[in-house]
Image (tube, grey):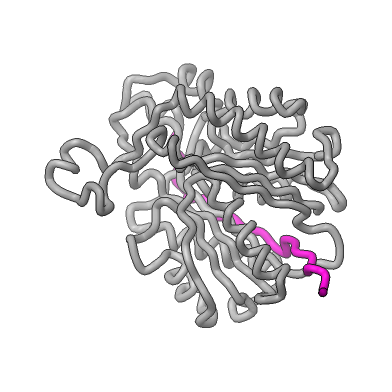
Amino acid sequence: MCEPIKVGILGLGKYLPEKILTNKDLEKIVDTTDEWIMSRTGIKERRIARDNEATSDMATEAARRALEAAKLKPEDIDLIIVATITPDMFFPATACLVQEKLGARTVPAFDVSVACSGFIYGIAIAKQFIASGVYKHALVVASEKLSSITDWTDRNTCVLFGDGAGAAVLGPVDRGGILSTYLGADGKQGELIKLPAGGSRIPATKKSIEDKLHFIKMNGSELFKHAVRIMADAALQATKPIGLKAEDINLVIPHQANVRILHAAAKRMGLSTDKIYLNIEKYGNMSAASSAVALVEAVEEGRIKRGDKILLDAFGGGLTWGAIVIEW
């Protein structure tokens, strides 16, 4: 029986809209303050996409940059996965739109809808296809326009979210690469964060719009409790099977949800906070794109070096969660 092919990340790319919405700007929109937002979330500003800028547009730009970094062309890609909860439309899949914009071949292209866990789910899925020899190169993109589903009159949620995209090109590597993956979900907790209307359960009507059911609804306090436990457990489930301990991990790149959640999760994992990469102050919560953009920036800033062991750790609506260990 053939050994599985080692799979790693060949190139990374990100795209962030130009418009910056600061906490001071939000003070003019809702009853909040910069101090209140910073103390509870760690967020100072976030990016907001243009009205005519869709999720696929941001995804395509991030993908182009990842392909350039990988020294590959669109026609070299065998599989396209887009992680998003803010697709351009219900169908076709945003991944198909990205395929067309890139000028890629007619390869399989599909979306993954697991909220903030999307980038990790996408990488885990793509890795299996490459490791088994079915495909050689896969493009995984996480792109979100959360500003389009945010209620800008709700101070509890509108301070949290931003827009952006990150992408990774996966392929065979000679050494290191993705050492382990772990995914999970608990549908019983699906009510904690959701977008109630727009699907078959509550189709769009005048009443659903008036009731603001097409915006994110979240039970923040309950979600906080689950998130800390879930992230710590996911880290353990990803590292234990390959014999790694907390001290063996060089850097943890978590989903950038809330700085208090991340510090509490780090403590539960037995990790010092200096091993946790944070960029939440600049971008807020970009759902699936958060982990992707954070990984790109950690590399850009020199926080990740050859041979380092990196842990990606995320949780999201569903509830869903996942963790991945990568040797760089």
Q: Residue at x 15, y 48 (%)?
A: 205
Out of 23 and 73, give the one closest to the viewer.
73
- Residue 8 within the magenta-colored segment of the rendering: yes
Residue that sits furthest to the left in the current view:
206
Task: Quarter of the image for the N terminus: give it.
Answer: bottom right
Out of 160 and 244, give the one closest to the viewer.
244
Q: Residue at x 76, y 33 (%)?
A: 275
Residue 3 falls left or right of residue 142: right
Residue 182 falls left or right of residue 55: right
Determine whether 222 is above or below 162 in the image: above
User: For residue 67, what is the image quadrant?
Assistant: bottom right
Instruction: Please state the horizontal and vertical placement of residue 244, each as a whole percent of the image.
Output: 83, 41
Instruction: Please state the horizontal and vertical placement of residue 121, each as a whole percent of the image.
Output: 58, 53
User: For residue 153, what is the image quadrant?
Assistant: top left
Determine whether 219 is above or below 115 in the image: above
Determine whether 98 is above or below 263 in the image: below
Q: Residue at x 81, y 40 (%)?
A: 250
Out of 181 and 104, give the one closest to the viewer.
181
Instruction: Please state the horizontal and vertical placement of residue 160, each as a whole percent of the image.
Output: 45, 33
- Picture mark count: 0
Determine whether 76 is above or below 215 in the image: below
Q: Which residues are magenta?
A: 1-21
- Residue 15 within the magenta-colored segment of the rendering: yes
